[in-house]
Image (tube, helix red, strand yellow):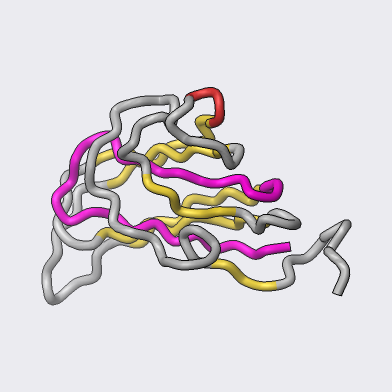
Amino acid sequence: MPANADPIFSRRGQVAANGTTGMATSITTATGDYTGASANHVLVFTADATNGSFVQRLRFKALGTNTASVARIYLNNGSANTTAANNSFYGELSLPATTAINTAATIDIDYPMNVALPAGFRIYVGVATTVAAGWVVTPVAGDY
């Protein structure tokens, strides 16, 4: 089948962190920078290597009890994220303090993106302060 040279609609859904081998890992350690170059940022999405991807939103889910923090979201050009010039500070989201109990759910927060990413581009997320239980970030996306 030829490559999707002029995509309008995605050909398959995508919710894996790196596009091939795994789901998102927990984000717990503070980054404290605005460049995306910290090694503490976590890869949450990689666009399709051939045709790129469309990212509708990122869903943040608390894994338990956490202090309040801020999530910072970066677009990366597919090269090393530890080089600031490869990253673009896309946005940020306030994360509330959460308490895990057996009688109520922890909060889900959707961060709308609605962005088409070129082939191989990535999304990294970091939290501004260290949290105890962590946050999982799940992309809601589609590969072209």
Question: Is 122 or 112 nearer to us in this picture?
Answer: 122
The residue shown at (82%, 61%) is 8
Q: Is residue 98 above or below residue 12?
A: above
Residue 101 place in picture, x, y as percent: 11, 69
x, y percent for residue 104: 19, 72
4 versus 47 height, above or below: below
Give percent across and percent down for residue 73: 46, 40
Q: Which residues are magenta?
A: 116-144
Locate residue 140 relative to residue 105 in the image: left or right. Answer: right
- The C terminus sits in image quarter: bottom right
Reply yes or no: does residue 60 show up in magenta: no
| Residue occupying image coordinates x 39% and y 57% | 137
Q: Considering the image in quadrants, where does the N terminus appear?
A: bottom right
Quarter of image, res 136: bottom left
Q: Answer above or below: position of 90 versus 103.
A: above
Q: Is residue 36 above or below residue 45?
A: above
* Residue closer to the observer: 50 or 34: 50
- Coordinates of residue 36 in the picture (x, y in percent): 43, 31
Residue drawn at x 53%, y 66% as measured from the top left: 20
Taking depth in this image into account, of 62 and 40 the one nearest to the observer is 40
